[in-house]
Image: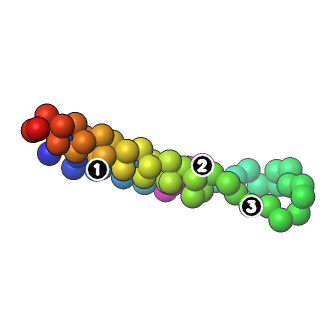
Amino acid sequence: MNFKYLLTVSFLIAFNAIMFAPPPAPGGPGCWPPPCVPIDGGISILVIAGAVYGGKKLYFDNKKRKSL
């Protein structure tokens, strides 16, 4: 039950961060060097997924250790 709740909350936070982010300002400063690559797009999702996976591993390892 707790894992499903954590997964749902993580998904909703990631969804809100991606979908409701403010658009960039028009006519803002350009980037240098020319191949402008946004870094935050995928990394934040990977960090959230890693935190969820780590939490799951800790939960099941503790549960397994207590049953022994």
Q: Residues within 10 Å of mark 2 (few under 14, many from 20)?
A: few
Q: Position of residue 18 (x, y in %)?
A: 51, 54
Q: Residue under label 1, please give it.
A: 8
Considering depth in this image, is 55 or 11 the residue closer to the camera? 55
The answer to which of 43 and 31 lies nearer the viewer is: 43
Disc number for residue 22: 2
C-alpha distance separating marks 3 and 2: 18 Å
Q: Nearer the viewer, mark 2 or mark 1?
A: 1
**Can you identify the residue that label 3 sits on?**
37
Q: Residue at x 13, y 34 (%)?
A: 66
**Image point (18%, 37%), residue name:** 65
- Please state the extent of the stretch shown in magenta in the rendering: 17-22
Label 2 sits on a secondary structure element that is: loop
Label 1's element? helix
The amino acid type found where label 1 is placed reads Thr
* Label 1 neighbour load within 10 Å: few <14, some 14-19, many 20+: few
Drawn side of residue 56 relative to residue 33, left or right:
left
Sooner in the amino-acid sequence: mark 3 or mark 2: 2
Residue at horizontal 70%, vertical 57%? 38
